[in-house]
């Protein structure tokens, strides 16, 4: 027990500090994506960010119908959800969220953040993790100003992409520089696009994804010209 010997010392602790001591803030990382398929790069980024920012957990959120990728076919949500579940099974502090695949219509980050804020309550800070390439598209997000009100944005390096200029982003999204964390972590040069190509061409890919995910891709004939195994999966 700590006693404060004077009113002057007590005044040092402002109301916000007292609230944080009584109700400490929980820090939750959000790593969304199509996960078509999830790969070792996703897991490495999540582990690095969680440790560096001292996050309580990382939510892996497979997208439902991403508006940015409406021009290409993606694997059904059931397959992508199952691959994420297999990839993170048994890993402490990693958790799967079905919030976007269970929501009808197109997927927008701002809607997901609003729902998570409501679900977790006021004593939670959200950390939205994305690559430098995705951050460059921030001015085109749905309601970007609301997004930065709801979360901190954690940007990590992507191969071949120069770091975005926070000053330039501030001109189009006022307030983002105060909510932006540019995290310098090891570059992970793995992409789902390349994995799909390697599967289709019969090239080795197993070293790029967790073992259970590689087995799942083979079993269900994903990313090949053969029709995938059709089965009902309950979310």
Image (cartoon, rainbow, N blue to C red):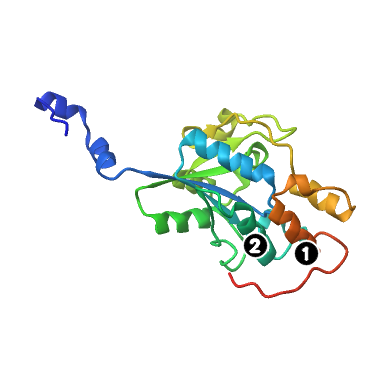
Picture coordinates of residue 1, whole percent (x, y): 16, 34
Query: Which residue occupies 60% across, 64% down?
Result: 101
Q: Are marks 1 and 2 in contact (CB under 8 Å)?
A: no
Query: What is the number of the mark on residue 15?
Result: none
In the picture, measured across the screen, residue 61 lies left or right of residue 78, that is left
Which residue carries the number 1 mark? 219
- Screen quadrant of the C terminus: bottom right
- In the figure, residue 223 lies in which quadrant? bottom right
Query: Which residue occupies 66% across, 64% down?
Result: 77
Disc with the residue nearer the chain's start (1 vs 2): 2
- Classify 10 Å Cα crowding around label 2: few (below 14), some (14-19), many (20 and above): some
Q: Is residue 167 above or below residue 29?
A: above
Between label 1 and label 2, give the one nearer the viewer: 1
In the picture, measured across the screen, residue 126 lies left or right of residue 79, that is left
Query: Which residue occupies 54% across, 58% down?
Result: 97
Query: Which residue occupies 52% across, 57% down?
Result: 111
Picture coordinates of residue 173, whole percent (x, y): 54, 39
> Which sits in the foreground, 128 or 177?
128
Q: Is residue 75 above or below residue 92?
A: below
> Which sits in the foreground, 156 or 165?
156
Picture coordinates of residue 110, whole percent (x, y): 52, 53
SS class, disc 1: helix
SS class, disc 2: helix
Which residue carries the number 2 mark? 82
Inter-mark Cα distance, 1 to 2 = 13 Å
How many numbered dots are placed on residues in this image?
A: 2
């Amino acid at each position: 027990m700590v006693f404060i010997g004077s009113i002057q010392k007590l005044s040092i602790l402002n109301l916000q500090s007292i609230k944080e001591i009584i109700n400490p803030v929980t820090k939750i990382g959000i790593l969304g994506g199509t996960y078509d398929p999830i790969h070792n790069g996703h897991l490495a980024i999540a582990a690095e960010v969680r440790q560096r920012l001292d996050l309580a957990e990382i939510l892996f959120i497979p997208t439902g119908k991403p508006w940015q990728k409406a021009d290409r076919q993606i694997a059904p949500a059931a397959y992508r959800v199952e691959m994420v579940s297999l990839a993170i099974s048994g890993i402490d502090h990693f958790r799967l969220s079905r919030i976007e695949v269970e929501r009808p219509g197109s997927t927008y980050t701002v809607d997901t953040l609003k729902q998570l804020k409501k679900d977790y309550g006021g004593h939670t800070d959200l950390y939205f993790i994305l690559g430098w390439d995705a951050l460059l598209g921030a001015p085109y997000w749905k309601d970007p100003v609301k997004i930065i009100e709801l979360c901190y944005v954690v940007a990590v390096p992507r191969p071949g992409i120069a770091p975005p200029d926070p000053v330039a982003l501030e001109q189009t999204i006022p307030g983002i520089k105060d909510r932006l964390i540019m995290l310098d972590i090891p570059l992970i040069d793995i992409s789902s696009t390349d994995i799909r190509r390697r599967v289709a061409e019969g090239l080795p890919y197993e070293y790029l994804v967790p073992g259970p995910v590689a087995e799942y891709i083979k079993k269900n004939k994903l990313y090949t010209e053969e029709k995938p195994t059709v089965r009902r999966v309950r979310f």
